[in-house]
Image (cartoon, grey):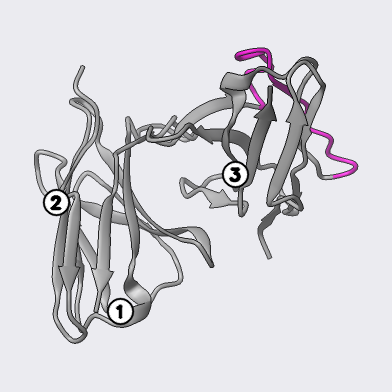
Amino acid sequence: KAGVTQTPRYLIKTRGQQVTLSCSPISGHRSVSWYQQTPGQGLQFLFEYFSETQRNKGNFPGRFSGRQFSNSRSEMNVSTLELGDSALYLCASSLGGGSTYNEQFFGPGTRLTVL
Amino acid sequence: AQRVTQPEKLLSVFKGAPVELKCNYSYSGSPELFWYVQYSRQRLQLLLRHISRESIKGFTADLNKGETSFHLKKPFAQEEDSAMYYCALVPDSNYQLIWGAGTKLIIKP
């Protein structure tokens, strides 16, 4: 089974621009979660999508948004980029159904640098 | 507030020595606790979860609700254990992971 893939792997943008990151989950997985990883703040939860609906959201400003398509692929968008948005953005997929937590499988991440 | 604390940013032990990576959590309900590991140039991956009560790669972790801890232990460290270790919790009826800051484990030969 192919793992979680994220594109692009590296991205350089300038302040004020916007960016879209993509995540393709493992086949059959319906939940996709996004995390931001920085040296200062560590891993922080952004949001989680299940069956095209945002199910959970972390404490990030509205500049951070996402969506999920019918094939479970997900995109994350950051508008009006700030220097502090420079980070590794991780995507994780899981089966997502039921009332208990399912193991999340992580992608390699997208390294975003904002200049 | 829900919080996971890993007090050690870096832990360095000799090969063959016991290892204990500390994790304390703050949550009033019944969380699920996990340890994730990230080896050099590899993806973050699940090491173990408390409900499984299993040993993975020689590591075990016991949930102590009284002390709100979930320390990761291994009796004899191996060089291949060198990695970044993250403790995480999922609050009940929720699906997001709340992460600790991580501990970098270095096993010296």
Marks 2 and 3 sit apart, C-alpha to C-alpha, by 27 Å
- At 9% from the left edge and 38% from the top edge, which residue is drawn? A71
CB contact under 8 Å: marks 2 and 3:
no
The answer to if B63 sits in the magenta stretch is yes
| Amino acid type at image mark 3 | Ala
| Amino acid type at image mark 2 | Pro
Pinpoint residue A30: horizontal percent, then vertical percent.
24, 36
3 or 1: mark nearer the eye: 3
CB contact under 8 Å: marks 1 and 2:
no
Report the chain holding disc 3.
Answer: B
Could you tell whether A30 is left or right of B4 in the image?
left
Report the chain holding disc 2.
Answer: A
**Residue for badge 1:** A62
CB contact under 8 Å: marks 3 and 1:
no
Region rendered in magenta: B50-67
Asked where in the image residue B60 lies, by quadrant, the reply is: top right
Pinpoint residue A59: horizontal percent, then vertical percent.
46, 71
Q: Is residue B72 at all visible to an observer of this figure? A: no
- At 80% from the left edge and 16% from the top edge, which residue is drawn? B75
Q: Secondary structure at mark 3?
A: strand
- Predominant SS of the magenta segment: loop
**Earlier sequence position, callout 1 versus callout 2:** 2
Pinpoint residue B67: horizontal percent, then vertical percent.
89, 44
Could you tell whether A86 is left or right of B16 in the image?
left
**Residue for badge 3:** B88
Could you tell whether A7 is left or right of B70 in the image?
left
**Residue for badge 2:** A8
2 or 3: mark nearer the eye: 2
